[in-house]
Image (spheres, helix red, strand yellow):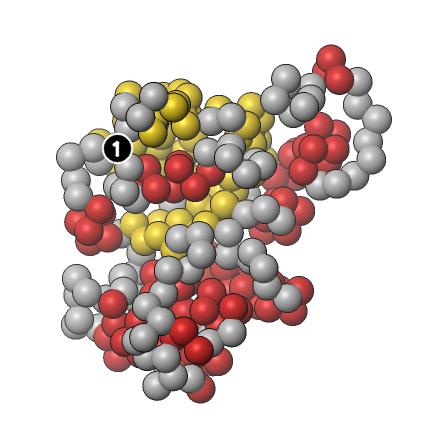
Amino acid sequence: MLLELADVEVAYGAVTALRGIRLTVDAGEIVTLLGANGAGKTTTLRTISGLLRPRAGQVLLDGEPLSKIPAHQLVRRGVAHSPEGRRIFPAMSVRENLLMGAFHDRKHVARDLEHVFGLFPRLQERVSQAGGTLSGGEQQMLAIGRALMSRPRLLLLDEPSMGLAPLVVRTIFDVIAQINAEGVAVLLVEQNAAQALKIANRGYVLETGQVVLDGPSGDLLADDRVRQAYLGEDVAVPEHDLPHQLAK
């Protein structure tokens, strides 16, 4: 098992954001986290990448607890995080942004740049352009490319399709599938539940900081509760059959 969250609890001051989260990601998998805004999805990714520390429970990578390992050292262990909102450096060029992702190992920079440009030819066309002048889709490509420059085993993606045109969304998801086919495990937070479940092996549904459903993606796509709450389908499901979070 590559990643495990064991009864993880995270709080912002007096407010508990995650309550006993249990999830796993195996090597080579795509796993998706679904849920409404405020459900705890971004907090989960930030906890895995070391930006937040659990109040209780453990985050384990290859069976080893990560609680005392700084975030920058997690990158060396193969965890890369492409955050919500992209967080690129707007005044830096595309090339400079990508090089920031390779801060811990410059031995293979030329090869890694070639790999990223192969995935995102648009970035190569704009290699000297300031990141802040790129379109939203290009900035998302840059954020993912920067994460890939660290040669991750586990890639955390937070809302990669948010605010993008359908054609760009298709490109982003095609690249995610290609990255995974190259052996990188992906933990994907995505509001586009249908697209996320089509690409993922398994999924977890979060509500108010708790996992309320989980299973293979095909099962979740066919689950009336998920279809009603997250896929926008008008499915007649008695409210008493729903978890109380999904019945809201």
How packed mark 1 is, by other alpha carbons closer than 10 Å (few <14, some 14-19, many 20 or more), is many
> Which quarter of the figure is the N terminus placed in?
top left
Q: Tag 1, which secondary structure? A: loop
Residue 232 coordinates in the image, percent (x, y): 75, 41
- Residue 174: quadrant of the picture: bottom right
What amino acid is at disc 1?
Answer: Arg
Q: How many marks?
A: 1
**Between 36 and 155, the one nearer to me in the picture:** 36
**Between 209 and 147, the one nearer to me in the picture:** 209
Residue 20 coordinates in the image, percent (x, y): 40, 20
Residue 116 in view (yes/no) = no
Q: Which residue is the extreme one toward the top?
A: 240
Is 247 positioned to the left or the right of 29 in the image? right
> Which quarter of the figure is the C terminus placed in?
top right
Query: Residue at (35%, 71%) from the top-left corner?
Result: 90
Query: Residue at (44%, 56%) from the top-left corner?
Result: 85
Residue 163 in view (yes/no) = yes
Compared with 65, 182 (above or below) is below
Is 31 positioned to the left or the right of 88 in the image? right
Is 165 positioned to the left or the right of 9 in the image? right
**Between 230 and 26, the one nearer to me in the picture:** 230
* Residue under pointer 1: 53
Compared with 102, 213 (above or below) is above
Residue 194 coordinates in the image, percent (x, y): 67, 47
- Residue 227: quadrant of the picture: top right
Query: Residue at (29%, 50%) from the top-left corner?
Result: 79
**Between 13 and 106, the one nearer to me in the picture:** 13
Residue 100 coordinates in the image, percent (x, y): 25, 67
Q: Which residue is the extreme one toward the front?
A: 14
